[in-house]
Amino acid sequence: MNTRNLPDLAGVTRGIVLFGVFQFFFLTFLAAFFYPGGYDYFNYYFSELGAVLAGNSEANTVSATLFFIALTTVSITLILFWLGLLKHFNKSRIENILSFIGSGMGLLCTPLLIGVALNPIDTQLETHFVFVMAHFILFSLAILVYSIVFIVNRQKSWHFALLGLIVLTLGVFLMVNPMSPNAAFLQKVIVYSYFIWVGTLTWFLEIHTKRKTFH
């Protein structure tokens, strides 16, 4: 695949991706702050932030609006992230193939976040669940593929492969046992870990592209 005309994870593109990650953290924490009756991080699922009605049956307008903006914005910026990765991993045929598969899965799962936001958990539960699971599966597979790419490309830091595999393991555990006692809290750990992975990887690749040396 010719990656010459694709965006690079540097400069403006890096700023857009990092902005998307930052606003996701900021707006979802803000949504939790405005959640009527108080948001319970340990017992409420992440999607409760986007519900039409809060747990105490009050209208959840502010929190749901912030939740929608956060997911929609980060979805748009993630397009640049997945395309940008293709330009960093094309030094060999196997790298090219794997990164194409990984980014393909990432691009497929990106709009699903908007589907999660458009289908509140309390009014469109079945549709919401389909979007959530599809996103989790595709994002997890994308991270798995890129963890392998990091191992294949020995010039890049192996720390991201390790972080990706840890997050993947937690995601698989949650998908296998979604009703575990700590599932609601674990879900938030996984979601935020996904975007920590995106943000730190974006920063790492931009810095080391400037230095032209990898460890």
Image (tube, helix red, strand yellow):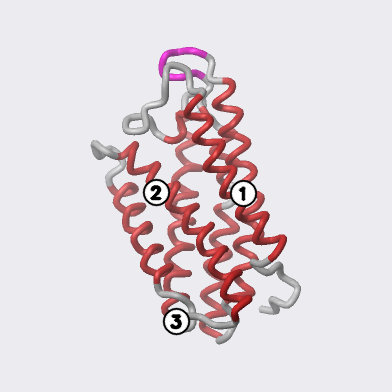
State the residue position of label 2.
Answer: 190
Secondary element at tag 3: helix
| Residue located at (57% from left, 65% from top) | 103
Residue, far left: 181
Is residue 98 part of the magenta span, yes or no?
Answer: no
Front-most of residues 111 and 65 = 65
Task: Quadrant for residue 143, please give it.
Answer: bottom left
Amino acid under disc 3: Val
Residue 152 numbered mark, or none? 3
Left or right relative to 188: residue 52: right
Residue 181 falls left or right of residue 40: left
Q: Amino acid at mark 1?
A: Gly
Question: Could you tell me residue 135's position as x and y percent?
Answer: 49, 49
Bounds of the magenta segment: 53-58
Residue that label 1 marks: 20
Label 3 Cα crowd, 10 Å radius (few <14 / some 14-19 / many 20+): some
Residue 52, percent from left and from top: 53, 21
The amino acid at mark 2 is Ile
- Residue 54 is covered by the magenta coloring: yes
- Looking at this view, is 35 or 119 the one in front? 35
In which quarter of the view is residue 73 placed? top right
Q: Position of residue 153 (x, y in %)?
A: 48, 82
